[in-house]
Image (cartoon, rainbow, N blue to C red):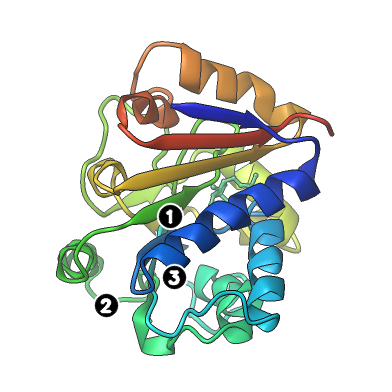
């Protein structure tokens, strides 16, 4: 495990973007596992800037996103598909048909979970997975539990996640109670993992996840067992 302490959020974002750029330069058809949340926004901004300067080409890159709310259409501003389109995809030359976000509106959600796992296999697995971390240690929407859920599944969101995500909605009542998320096995099977955490409020959970026991009560703790994990954090604000 490599831990990099960034000076501030902007430094964190540039460092993360540098690592993702190197991945795409070295393997242009990389499968990038991508994340939503506020933390990766700066990384995506930096990638867009370098793309606009001609430094990175995403024309043959592919992406699989971690998760999506259940019951929300992809064109809804709160959906994670909309987030990815707005913060990254619509600004770079990745082909839309090469970007995958699970559907939270599938008629048969169990079938959608299975199809998403099959898709990850079909694209050859994830070369580099970008992750944020929730205050309760969730990665993707893998919430604290009795056991690590291996495959893509439907999850009931915990109260801390609902409260944390309420900032993106008009009211807490509007936050969906369920989500579809990639499982721990798919995340752990990524060739490389890049975990980013920003802010004083993430320091405690990062310490627990990286230095405490590996337990499904803190899903991110499993990352200690990954052979190629890089963590970039800034606890400045
Ligand atoms: O980067 P943020 O906004 O703190 O979010 C942390 C985590 O919470 C989520 O937004 C889900 O609640 C994840 O997608 C993200 O990794």
At a point 44% along the width and 59% down the height, the residue shown is: 23
Question: Looking at this view, is 77 or 30 the one in front?
Answer: 30
Query: In screen coordinates, is 53 left or right of 75?
Result: right
Q: Tell me residue 110's x, y (percent).
A: 20, 63
The answer to whether the residues at label 1 and label 2 have Cβ atoms under 8 Å apart is no
Instruction: Give the number of the disc on residue 107.
Output: 2
| Of callouts 1 and 3, the N-terminal one | 3
| Of callouts 3 and 2, the N-terminal one | 3
Query: In screen coordinates, is 216 left or right of 74?
Result: left
Label 3 packing within 10 angstroms: few (<14), some (14-19), many (20+): some
Label 1: which residue?
A: 178
C-alpha gap between disc 1 and disc 3:
8 Å
User: Quadrant of residue 119 in the image?
Assistant: bottom left
Residue 191 seen anywhere in this rendered image of the structure: yes
Question: Looking at this view, is 232 or 88 the one in front?
Answer: 232
Label 3: which residue?
A: 71
């Amino acid at each position: 495990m490599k831990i990099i302490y960034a000076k501030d959020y902007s430094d964190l974002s540039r460092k993360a973007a540098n690592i993702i750029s190197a991945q795409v330069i070295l393997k242009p058809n990389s499968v990038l596992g991508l994340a939503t949340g506020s933390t990766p926004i700066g990384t995506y901004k930096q990638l867009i800037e370098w793309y606009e300067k001609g430094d990175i080409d995403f024309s043959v890159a592919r992406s699989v996103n971690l998760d999506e709310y259940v019951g929300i259409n992809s064109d809804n501003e709160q959906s994670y598909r909309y987030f990815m389109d707005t913060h990254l995809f619509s600004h770079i030359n990745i082909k839309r048909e090469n970007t995958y976000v699970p559907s939270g509106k599938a008629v048969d959600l169990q079938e959608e979970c299975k199809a998403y796992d099959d898709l990850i296999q079909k694209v050859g697995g994830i070369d580099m997975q970008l992750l944020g971390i929730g205050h309760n240690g969730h990665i993707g929407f893998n919430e604290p539990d009795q056991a690590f859920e291996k495959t893509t599944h439907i999850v009931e969101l915990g109260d801390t996640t609902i409260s944390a995500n309420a900032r993106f909605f008009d009211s807490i009542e509007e936050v969906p109670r369920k989500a579809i998320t990639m499982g721990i096995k798919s995340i752990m099977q990524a060739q490389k993992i890049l975990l980013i955490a920003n802010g004083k409020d993430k320091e405690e959970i990062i310490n627990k996840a990286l230095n405490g026991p590996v337990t499904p009560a803190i899903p991110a703790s499993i990352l200690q067992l990954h052979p190629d994990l890089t963590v970039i954090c800034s606890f400045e604000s």
